[in-house]
Image: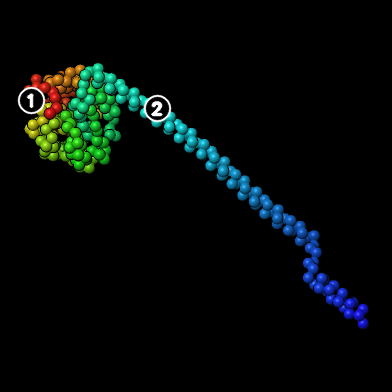
Amino acid sequence: MEGIITLGIVISLLFLVIRFMPMPKSEAAILAQVAEQAQQIQAQEKKINEQAILIRALEKKQRELLEEIAILNRNYRLQVEQNAQLRQELAELRKTLGMNPHSLMILGIWPFPETELNTRVEEIAIYNAGFEYRSLRKEEATKEKIVEELDRHPYFILEIGSHGGNDDDYIHLYDDIARPGWWRELVQRYPSLKAILLLACQSDRTGDVLIQAGVPVVISVQRNIPDAHVGIFVRNFYRRLSVNRRTYQDLNDAFEYARHILPEKSAQMIRFRSTVELYEPLQPD
């Protein structure tokens, strides 16, 4: 009896083992699984290769950016060195000429610096003449900014490089037009202004109003002349002033000197007018 029970237990255990034991896979199933895993490996390799290409591209871009930054840093250092050298040369020039570094301040107004006039060369000529120069360009060349700057410093010469009205008497600023009445009130409010250079075509009528307002000296342009000729005139005008600038006569001499260098047609378009005796001292208030 015990043998029969033992045999039954053995048979039951064998049944359970056979029931839950996984059946062996066929060769085709194994090959299919291997192929699937191979495809997954290939996809991962492709993705890794794509990432490697992207990394190399980013590394190349990084190297290029670092090279550009290095070039910019070198250029910046060179510019700083050049500026320092220019300041040193200017200081030595002023010392040699015995000039007051804060005398004869000039305010330049350039609403449209995209013209062909090389204003940077002009600025160098002004600095070499021993003057202090400040310019309002593009969006700074507005009525509000002009008034703010004149409130800040006692400017002696006002230089306006802009466009005039073809059939009118206004001067273009960045945000508006400025008619003679506006300029008249401006010079009356700031008596330190002793000379105005209207480097704007068709500015002669505005020059008339400024003379009537009591500006000691007005230089204006009657008709259109090339920007290059304006640049030649301005550079030589300030270069001549660096030689002599004691009286208003020296201002007139600088005008004549610069005007006679121009081609005849352009020279005839520039006028010098004065309301003071030319022997009076050319000094700010």
Q: Specify whether residue 65 is in view.
A: yes
In this figure, which colouring scheme has been used for the structure? Answer: rainbow
Q: Is residue 79 left or right of residue 4?
A: left
Which residue is at a point 10% across and 35% down the rendered structure image?
A: 188
Question: Disc 2 or 1, which lies upstream in sequence?
Answer: 2
The structure residue drawn at horizontal position 11% and vertical position 33%, both measured from the top left corner, is 191
Residue 71 sits above or below residue 139 on the image? above
Depth check, mark 2 against mark 1: the one in front is 2
Q: Name the secondary structure under disc 2.
A: helix
Position of residue 25 relative to residue 176, above or below, is below
Residue 229 seen anywhere in this rendered image of the structure: no
Report which residue position mark 2 lands on.
78
Residue 157, position as x, y percentages in the image:
17, 29
- Badge 1 marks a residue whose secondary structure is loop
**Three-letter amino acid code at the position of disc 2:** Leu
Q: Nearer the viewer, residue 124 or 105?
A: 105
- Please give the residue where the numbered disc 1 appears in the rendered image: 276
Q: CA distance from mark 2 to mark 1?
A: 47 Å
Residue at image location 24% in from the left, 32% down from the top: 134
Position in image of residue 119 (x %, y %)? 27, 29
Looking at the picture, tell me which residue is in the foreground, 248 or 154. Answer: 154
Residue at the location (7% across, 25% down)? 276
